[in-house]
Amino acid sequence: MRTHRHATHSGGTVRDLAVGDSAVLGDPLVDLMQRRRLAELGLRRGEAVRMVLHSVGGARVVSVRGSRIALDATTAALLPVQDGPS
């Protein structure tokens, strides 16, 4: 049985999360248009995310409110995270 760990990621980004790690999103480091699109997907400041998958090309799949969202490596690196939810 696999257990999910809750790691500390202050100062890191979504790209830094290991599979199974949870964290809380900070303010996205993107322009307003991209910030709005991310918010439509549920990726907004204060939202809890869990890393589901790393791809070979650096893309990431995260779980947010029960939905899985694929992010390219560049976008994942622009989404800062804080300590995971308890």
Image (cartoon, helix red, strand yellow):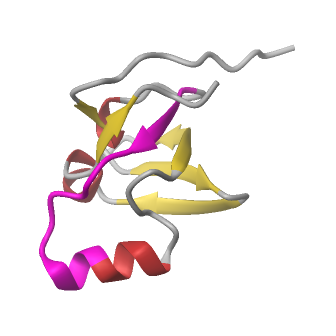
Residue 40 percent location from the top left of the image: 47, 81
Asked if residue 50 lies left or right of residue 33, the reply is right
* Residue 29: in magenta span: yes
Q: Is residue 40 above or below residue 49?
A: below
Give the position of the C terminus as an image quadrant. Answer: top right
* Residue 12: in magenta span: no
Taking depth in this image into account, of 82 and 56 the one nearest to the observer is 82
Q: Is residue 46 above or below residue 21?
A: below
Residue 70 percent location from the top left of the image: 47, 61
- Residue furthest to the bottom in view is 33
Q: Measuring 55% from the left and 46% from the top, which residue is drawn there?
A: 48
Q: Measuring 29% from the left and 24% from the top, which residue is drawn there?
A: 10
Q: Measuring 34% from the left and 38% from the top, which residue is drawn there?
A: 81
Give the position of the N terminus as an image quadrant. Answer: top right
Taking depth in this image into account, of 25 and 15 the one nearest to the observer is 25
Q: Is residue 43 above or below residue 83?
A: below
How many numbered marks, from 0 up?
0
Asked if residue 39 lies left or right of residue 49, the reply is left
Asked if residue 60 lies left or right of residue 27, the reply is right
Residues in magenta, as a range: 21-35
Residue 4 percent location from the top left of the image: 69, 20
Taking depth in this image into account, of 79 and 27 the one nearest to the observer is 27
Q: Measuring 78% from the left and 16% from the top, which residue is drawn there?
A: 2
Residue 15 percent location from the top left of the image: 31, 39
